[in-house]
């Protein structure tokens, strides 16, 4: 499955960074004997993903090491602190008052289950006996359009995107994709950009692993139908050159 997905991506969307496999680890014993490059360093969820997509490294972090309280609590590594649930962390920063800040936090996706740790690894280096929960990848807007078309290929309708402007990849592309079993497209948050090297032009996408086959089918079918990336331009004959730049019959 991994090789098929990677070859499909190479053919249809040509990503700049590596797709990342995400696994919620229920017991730390489940990763015993697995070689992991970055383990229990004080880093954020988005930084774990960045290590995997930029460097091709595997990472594993447990709750007391997961450095961003939003990512750690969203992903079930710690219980969500009251200062988060009550909106104190974002009041007067993202929202004008405590009521609006609390409302934003209450709408943010979080897993209710507690997990021992959070594992990321590049899809180019699968880990034996580990099946990802979610695949996260980063695109430009044109590549995101191709994924959106693939998501709608089988059932049509429309793609609805939700965002809080904060905790982007962890709450939406990882957690919401995991909870709903639906693909997600999200605007990366400030922390992802500042601490995990996400670029201005990038969007984050989360795909439940169980939906990977239909995404592959959607990408390939729409590609075969003529929707290509990079988008080919329509270069017309007799373009609107300035008069003196035009070749005359007398030239």
Image (cartoon, rainbow, N blue to C red):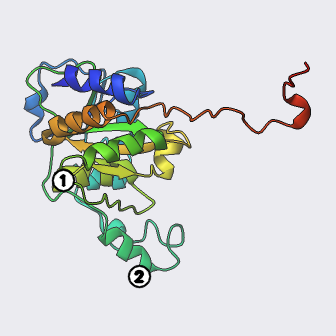
Q: Secondary structure at mark 1?
A: loop
Is residue 114 in view from this perspective?
Answer: yes
**Which residue sits at x=27%, y=27%?**
121
Quadrant (top left, top right, bottom left, bottom right) of the N terminus: top left
- Side of 96 where 30 appears, left or right: left
Q: Residues within 10 Å of mark 2 (few under 14, many from 20)?
A: few
Give the number of the disc on residue 155: 1
- Side of 72 where 179 appears, left or right: left
**Which residue sits at x=47%, y=44%?**
141
Observer-nearest residue: 47 or 202? 202
Q: Position of residue 152 (x, y in %)?
A: 26, 50
Query: Which of marks 2 and 1 precedes in the sequence?
Result: 2
Rendering quarter of residue 55: top left
- Side of 115 where 137 appears, left or right: right
Which is more foreground, mark 1 or mark 2? 1
Of all residues, the one furthest to the front in this rendering is: 249
Q: Position of residue 42 (x, y in %)?
A: 37, 38
Residue that mark 2 sits on: 99
Observer-nearest residue: 242 or 12? 242
Is residue 52 in view from this perspective?
Answer: no
Tags 1 and 2 in contact by the CB under 8 Å rule? Answer: no
**Which residue sits at x=32%, y=46%?**
149
Give the number of the disc on residue 89: none
């Amino acid at each position: 499955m991994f090789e098929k997905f990677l070859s499909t991506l190479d053919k249809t969307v040509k990503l700049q960074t590596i797709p990342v496999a995400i696994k919620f680890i229920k017991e730390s014993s489940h990763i015993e004997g697995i070689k992991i490059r970055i383990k229990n360093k004080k880093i954020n969820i988005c930084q774990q993903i960045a290590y995997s997509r930029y460097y091709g490294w595997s990472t594993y972090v447990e709750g007391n090491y997961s450095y961003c309280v939003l990512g750690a609590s969203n992903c079930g590594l710690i219980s969500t602190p009251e200062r988060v649930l009550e909106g104190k962390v974002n009041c007067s920063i993202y929202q004008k008052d405590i009521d609006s800040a609390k409302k934003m936090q209450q709408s943010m996706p979080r897993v209710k289950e507690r997990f021992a740790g959070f594992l990321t690894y590049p899809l180019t280096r699968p880990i034996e006996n580990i099946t990802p929960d979610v695949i996260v990848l980063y695109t430009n807007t044109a590549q995101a359009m191709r994924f959106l078309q693939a998501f709608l290929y089988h059932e049509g309708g429309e793609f609805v995107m939700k965002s809080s402007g904060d905790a982007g990849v962890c709450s939406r592309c990882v957690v919401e994709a995991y909870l709903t079993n639906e693909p997600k497209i999200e605007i990366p948050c400030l922390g992802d950009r500042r601490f995990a090297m996400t670029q201005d032009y990038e969007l984050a996408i989360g795909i439940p692993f169980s939906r990977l086959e239909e995404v592959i089918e959607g990408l390939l079918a729409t590609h075969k139908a003529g929707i290509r990336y990079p988008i080919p331009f329509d270069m017309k004959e007799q373009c609107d050159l300035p008069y003196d730049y035009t070749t005359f019959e007398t030239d």
